[in-house]
Image (cartoon, helix red, strand yellow):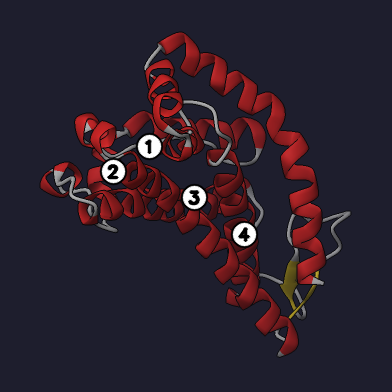
């Protein structure tokens, strides 16, 4: 399952589902909080089509190119929301922003539970992390459906841990910035919101997040490995 074509398909299907679920969670919480923008544009859905139409570069082009270059996928997406609603309801906007990373955490936990369950049932066995990118593999190996499932669950776990952690870094344009702005008191939150609207501030935020993320990811993945074993 690790060949280029098969790996690309597996990674993309997991990426597509995980990103769609992330954006659905944003849209649903916004709708429940009183902003109907995403609902009216058809984004409160697990159907990836509206999300693909809104972000074709971030959900199609960039993931495929990053996989071919790096062996893993990165991308971006968004759902429309009413910025005036966000200014008037900073706590609700914070919850809406937190919903996306929380959805990814849920998927990561689901993958982890399935792995541990199948390990306990002796369907999976621990993979050699020195020679494999997967945490587990099917007993007996080969190219069985169970081998494919082991690979897909590993991808789902890794990708969703990355999406959860990276998006919660509190710098714009990431979700963590909106969460922080909603939690800051009074004028501090307003000031931070205004700073987030500056393109240069968003670019600086992405550069800082990309630089800082390895220090966050390394201990997180050590913890994930420990939880599996």
Give the residue at x 51% y 64%. Answer: 106
174 vs 130, left or right, is: left
Where is residue 223? Give x, y as percent.
Answer: 78, 59
* Disc 1 to disc 2, C-alpha distance: 7 Å
* Residue tagged 4: 157
Q: Residue furthest bottom?
A: 121
Give the residue at x 18% y 49%. Answer: 34
* Disc 1 to disc 4, C-alpha distance: 20 Å
Of mark 1 and mark 2, the one earlier in the sequence is: 2
Q: Residues within 10 Å of mark 3 (few under 14, many from 20)?
A: many
* Residue tagged 3: 101
* Disc 3 to disc 2, C-alpha distance: 17 Å
Q: Which mark is residue 77?
A: 1
Of marks 3 and 2, the one in the foreground: 3
Of mark 4 and mark 2, the one earlier in the sequence is: 2
* Disc 1 to disc 3, C-alpha distance: 13 Å
> Do tag 1 and tag 2 residues touch (Cβ < 8 Å)?
yes
The secondary structure type at the circle numbered 2 is: helix
Where is residue 87? Give x, y as percent.
Answer: 27, 31
Residue 90 in sight from this viewpoint: yes
Where is residue 130? Give x, y as percent.
Answer: 89, 54
* Disc 3 to disc 4, C-alpha distance: 13 Å
Of mark 1 and mark 3, the one earlier in the sequence is: 1
> Do tag 1 and tag 3 residues touch (Cβ < 8 Å)?
no
């Amino acid at each position: 399952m690790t060949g280029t074509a098969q790996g690309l398909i597996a990674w993309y299907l997991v990426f597509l589902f995980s990103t769609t679920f992330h954006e659905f969670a944003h849209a649903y919480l916004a709708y429940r909080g009183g902003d109907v923008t995403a609902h009216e544009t058809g984004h409160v859905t697990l159907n990836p089509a509206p999300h693909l139409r809104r972000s074709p570069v971030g959900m199609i082009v960039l993931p495929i190119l990053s996989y071919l270059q790096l062996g893993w996928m990165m991308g971006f997406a968004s759902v429309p929301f009413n910025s005036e609603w966000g200014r008037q309801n900073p706590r609700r906007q914070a919850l809406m922003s937190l919903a996306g990373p929380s959805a990814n955490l849920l998927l990561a936990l689901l993958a982890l539970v399935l792995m541990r369950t199948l390990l306990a049932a002796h369907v999976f066995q621990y993979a050699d992390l020195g020679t494999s990118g997967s945490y587990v593999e099917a007993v007996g190996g080969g190219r069985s459906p169970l081998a494919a499932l082991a690979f897909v669950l590993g991808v789902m776990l890794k990708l969703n841990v990355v999406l959860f952690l990276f998006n919660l870094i509190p710098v714009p344009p990431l979700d963590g910035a909106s969460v922080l702005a909603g939690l800051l008191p009074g004028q501090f939150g307003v000031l931070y919101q205004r700073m987030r609207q500056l393109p240069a501030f968003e670019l600086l935020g992405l550069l800082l997040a990309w630089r800082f993320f390895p220090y966050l990811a390394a201990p997180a993945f050590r913890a994930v490995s420990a939880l599996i074993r």
